Structures are given as structure tokens and as C-alpha cells.
Amino acid sequence: MDKAGRFVIDTHVHAQRHAAGHSLKEKQKSTGKKGEFDYIDLDSQLPTITTYDNSPRLLYDMDRYGVDMCILQSAFGMNNDINVDLVKRYPDKFRAMAFAKTTMDAIVAGEKEWDMKDAIEELDGLLSTGMFCAIGEGAPAIPETAANLRRYSYNMSHRMDELRLVMDLARKHKVPVTMHTGTGGGYPITHSRWPEDWHPYWIMDLAAEYPDVTIVFSHGGMQGGYITDLVEQCLNVASNFNNVYLETGLYWTDLYYRALRYPNVGPEKLVWGTDWGASLPVQTRIGQNPQTFAMQVHNQGIIKHQCDIMGWSLRQIERLDISQDDMNLILGGNALNIFKIEYPLTRMFKGLPNVGR
Ligand SMILES: [Zn+2]
């Protein structure tokens, strides 16, 4: 495949994979549950399972599909160490976001109660190393163990104050913050654990209070399925605030057009990022609109192969009939600018005078 743009960055990638089989079998023994494992079983185990470096498969896909660089994110139990190691080994291919893994592990292990200040302190230390380009995946939140789901509940002002601590830290280190939106369908993401995931409008206030801090909506409101209410909300926020961007790698072609048409959004506010490595299979529903979309579907069981989200996503975006300059912004230029990634040439991206300097 020819490259889709001058410089292609997948801004949402998980280069670690969980070795889940053993842990799931142990759980089955202890609970007496029979039959196949489902996403709910898996989700409850993920924070405690060790992960391994899945970069051989990632590098293969990057090579196949002409993706120049990936921004590595940690989530559900993935650690910072493997990502930092990859950044060191492949400085021209990878960047990493900082994730409050130690704090979350301590809570999963029952060693302490959730306090956002612990996560902030950990992130502060990580960002001070200079090895990270942003905060993510999403803002820190209590890990998704079954016990926590029952025990913990946010009210809005409490969570907003937690998020303000994240914004303060991003301001201090001059890095962007990601705010997660949507669900893949399989793993439960609850209101009480990660409320901003379901309430993109909350981010309006943070965008207004911190105009100098860049916010990227992970998935731009579409992580799975084809219900678009969160996309509409994200578009509304991005349209109102210059510092808010939408990650679009799970958009199908028509959703891109919706964002491209909307006033104050357009190609200047979109960044491509697929969630590669998150086990998000693409569903095909012939004759339906959209005909394809990403979603974890319960009755299909847990996906065991490395689903090809990068190939699907690139085909969705390459179908757009827009100028290559606009395409180059979405596929890499905006990300180079937001994440302050060096680039060998100036004046290659429309309206981005800082790229290449
Ligand atoms: Zn992700």
C-alpha cells in the first residue's frame, strides 16, 4: 500500500498484550464457572495480568500499512517500562504517554485507597524524565476491579476537581492530556469509575479554564458500535474550544465527513489514532450504514488473533475525497504539532509553522 500521507502517525496504540490464559483458568477454578471466557471475565482480570512486548506484530503492521510512527499508550494493567524501552530502541518510530500504573497497582492489590494526588505524583515523576509526550490513556481513574465498581462513586464536582489536578500537571510539563470517550462494547466502563468517558460536555469547563493545555478526546466519541451521541458531543466541544482535538481512528468514512463539515472543526482538529492492540474487532453488516464498525460483540467471544484495525481504519480515511494537505494534517501533521515531535522539514503541513522547527 502506498503511504496514505507525508508522515503517518497512529496516535493511539497499545504495544503490549496480556498473557491472559493462565489467569482466566485460575479464575475459572476458583469460581467454578464453566465454558468459554467472556469480556466481563477478562476485564476483571486485566489489571492484574502481566503484559508482554507485542512490538513484533506492531512493527509488522506499521511496515505493511506505511505507518511511520506510533504513540504508545498504557491502559488496563499495561506498564510504562515496555513502552519506554520501545521508545529508546526505536526513537524514530515510537513515543509514549505517561500512565499512573504503580498507583493503580497498589489499589488493585488493596494496599491503599484511591487518591488522585497519588496518581498525579507518579505522573509528575514520569513526565520529569522527559521520556513521555502526553498523559494517557485518558485521565487517571480508579482501576476497574469488581470490588471498586461496587465501592467507589464520583460526584461531578469531585471528579472535576480531580481532572483539574491532571490539567495543572499538564500545564506544568507543557504536554497534552487525553480524555477517554466511549466504549468498545465488551469491557464495562461505568459512570462511577470514569464519568467523563460518558460526559464529554464536562470537558468544556476544563478547556475554558486551561486554554493553554491541549486536550485530545481519545476516540473522538466513537470507540465501538455505531451509536453516535458521544461523537456529537465531542464535535460540539472541539468546535467551541481551539485547544480540543478529536482522535478519529475508529470513525468510518461518513463520520469523518461529519467532523470535516462542522464549523470550527475540520481537518485542523482531527488526529488519526486506531487503538491498535486493544482487541477491537471490526464488524461487517452488509447493507447497513455504516457497513463496518469496530465493536467487541459478546456472542462472538473474546478475540484471540491480532485484529487488523490499522488496515480497516486507513481504508476508511483514504476513501475521503479531500485535499492531500488536509489528509496530511489528520494523519500526522496535527500530531507532530500537538505532541511536539521533531520533523526534518518546515512548511510541509498547512497552517503549522512550528512543525519542523
Ligand atoms: Zn486504547
Image: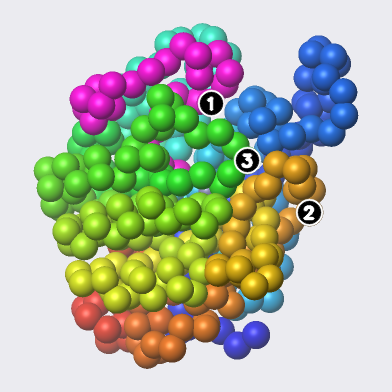
At x 59%, y 62%, the residue is: 293
Can you tell which mark lies on residue 144? Answer: 1
Q: Is residue 299 above or below residue 111?
A: below
Look at the image and tell me in which quarter the N terminus lies: bottom right
Label 3 crowd (10 A; few <14 / some 14-19 / many >=20): many
User: Which amino acid does the dot numbered 2 rest on?
Assistant: His
User: Which amino acid does the dot numbered 1 rest on?
Assistant: Glu
Q: Secondary structure at mark 2?
A: loop
Q: Nearer the viewer, residue 213 or 31?
A: 31
Q: Is residue 175 visible?
A: yes
Residue 177 coordinates in the image, percent (x, y): 32, 47
User: Mark 3 highlights which residue?
Assistant: 186
Q: Is residue 281 above or below residue 137?
A: below
User: Which amino acid does the dot numbered 3 rest on?
Assistant: Gly
Q: Is residue 150 above or below residue 250?
A: above
* Segment colored magenta: 136-162
Look at the image and tell me in which quarter the C terminus lies: bottom left
Residue 140 coordinates in the image, percent (x, y): 39, 32
Q: Nearer the viewer, residue 202 or 349?
A: 202
Left or right of residue 304: residue 216: left
Can you tell which mark lies on residue 305? Answer: 2
Residue 75 coordinates in the image, percent (x, y): 53, 39
Q: Secondary structure at mark 1?
A: loop
Label 3 or label 2, whichever comes before in sequence order: 3
